[in-house]
Every structure is written in C-alpha cells, then in structure tokens.
Image: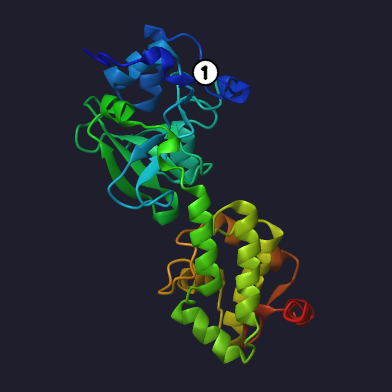
Amino acid sequence: MIFDNFDLANFWDNSSEWARESYVGEKVTDELIRSTESELGYRLPASYLELMRSQNGGMTHRDCFPTEQRTTWSHNHVAISGILGIGRDKTYSLCGSIGSSFMIEEWGYPEIGVCICNCPSAGHDMIMLDYSKCGPTGEPEVVHVDQEWDYKITFLAKNFEEFIRGLVPSSVYDTSEQDLIDALKKIDHGSFSSTLTKLIADSGEPMFGPLIRKLCRDKTNDFGAFALHADETSQTVYDLLFYLYSATNVVRDKESYFKIYPDIIVFGDGDFSTKGYAPSFIEGWFDERVASKKIVDVTGVGLKFSDEYMMLVRQKLVQ
C-alpha cells in the first residue's frame, strides 16, 4: 500500500502564509489530474497523486535528501523549499506561472520529465521526475538537476515514494556555524588559484590580493557562505578580477571572458574559490558595465575599463 505506516498528517508545514498562497492548490479531482497530465505530457506517479490528495502542494517539515556525491547545494545532501501541486491556479503548481513547463522552457532544464520540487536556490537547481528510462507513462526516477553545473543530473531515488520517505529535517545537516568558520579560514589563508596568482603577480600590485580577500570576507560574513551575487560588494570583486585579467590579456568579447572566469575564483586549483556560481549575476554585472560605458571596446586592444572607471577601480587599492 502506498505510504503505508507513513505520517501524512504531520508531513506538511503550513506555518507560512506565503507558502499557503503560493503552493497549496485546490482539492485534487480526477478531472484536474487528467488535465494536468495532458498538459505536461506525462502520467504522474500514483504515490505523488496520493500525497497530493492529503494536501495539494506545499512546504514540508522534512526538507533535505541525502546524496552520495556533491551538488552545488552541499557535499552530502540536497534541499527542497516546496513540492509543486497539481493544477495551474497557484504560482508554484505543476502548470502554474512558475511551474514545470516554465522551468524547462525559460530556464533551460532538460526535457526529461516534470519539475516536481523547488529548491532554496531560487531556480538554480530543481528536483525532477525523470522519465528517460520508463517513458511518459512509466514510473519515473527522482533526480536533482544542477543548473549552475551545466544541468548536471544526480540520481536520488528510484521512485517518488522512496524520495518522500527519504526526506529528513534540515537540522540533521545544520553545520552553518562551523561552515562559516571554515569558509572564513579559506578566505583568509587559502591559496589563490594559479590563474589568479599569476594575474596579481603580473599586475605588479600586491595589494590586489589582500583587497580581494577583504571583500570576500565581508561578503561571506553578511551572507553566511562564500558566494558572489549581484550586491555591491560582489560587483566590486567582479570589477577587480576583470581589471586584473584585461590588464595582461586580450578580452575579445563577453563569452571569452566568461570562459576563463571560473578558473579565476570558482573552480580553480586553489583553496580560495566559491565552488559554484550563478552565471546570471556576472552577466548582469558585465552587461551593466558595458551599457554604462565603464567597459569599452578599444580598437586593437579588446574590451577594457574606460580610463575614468579604471581610475575608480585603482582607487580601491588605497582605500
């Protein structure tokens, strides 16, 4: 029997009004199931339908699933922020405005099945029902898909019921205090990547190193983890890295710089690295710098900061 000896009554977490408004849909009917499956093009698992009959989508008390390999979220687990319900009336329902089709068509998730759970990364990773092996009417596996790692797929469970039964509370993995200590230690003392080390050496400005460490330390203390986003501190780090690279290398276009960027501070061979990044943040920084003419195309030289903005960037070395 599906979910035999499983406490469905205490599975859902309805403490958040936002979650109730965004996730929890109308009562599930046979007609709603048929129309949803028809729109998606897949038969939904019986265990998922049973869970939705207890409540049609929402947040859960147990929101982490263990993994045997690292993802962008963690080295030993993934997290969910909510399960998408059946229908289209809620923002986070399967056929809703930010539902499965939206994530596949607009965010580029692979066409392997159905996006079934959101993750705390706001779209940069998802839990999906994977019908690749079973076909659209079979019993799908449950997988994690990493948008930031070129949509890498990590197997989680052989079916949806196994996935739900395997969820554990986030408190099991609550190492945030020690994680912050470890991150700050790497920022203060970890080796730069060989690429960044060479860029700093070639610049003749040894203060670039301490300044980059200080900015990343400030960002990590504010955010709780070593990551760069769209905030002012992160954009200053983007500025410094571009300044260093373009000073001794030809940047022909945006794509060529984005190709080398991960080697500098993301997946480089040093301890000082973010280990993951959201391309949209650095793309937003680059596009703004070009639009405001802070990055200009110098004939025969390539893309560089304008003389005026270059002076502002250099001033940060002595502040």
The amino acid sitting under disc 1 is: Val
**Which corner quadrant of the image does residue 11 belong to?**
top left
Q: Is residue 196 above or below residue 149?
A: below
Q: What scheme was used to colour the molecule?
A: rainbow
- The vertical placement of 247 against 285, above or below, is below
Residue 256: x percent and y percent? 50, 73
Left/right of residue 140 with respect to residue 317 in the rendered view: left
Residue situated in front as seen by the camera: 192 or 128: 192
Return the x and y of residue 237 as percentages of the image width and height.
63, 69
Name the residue carrying label 1: 24
Residue 110 in sight from this viewpoint: no
Q: Quadrant of the N terminus?
A: top left
Total marks in image: 1
Residue 314 vertical placement versus 262 (above, below): below
Please tell me which residue lies in front, 214 or 199: 214
**Going 30% across and 51% down the picture, which residue do you hit?**
69
In the rendered structure, the answer to whether residue 215 lies left or right of residue 152 reads right
Instruction: Quarter of the image for the C terminus: give it.
Output: bottom right
Q: Secondary structure at mark 1?
A: loop
Is 20 located above or below residue 72 in the figure? above
Instruction: Residue 308: give x, y in percent of width and height.
Output: 80, 79
- Dot 1 crowding, Cα within 10 Å, few <14, some 14–19, many 20+: many
Which residue appears at 33% of the width and 20% of the height?
A: 48
Q: Quadrant of residue 215?
A: bottom right
Q: Quadrant of residue 287?
A: bottom right
Where residue 196 sits in the image (x, y, percent)?
51, 79
For the question of whether residue 24 can be seen, the reply is yes
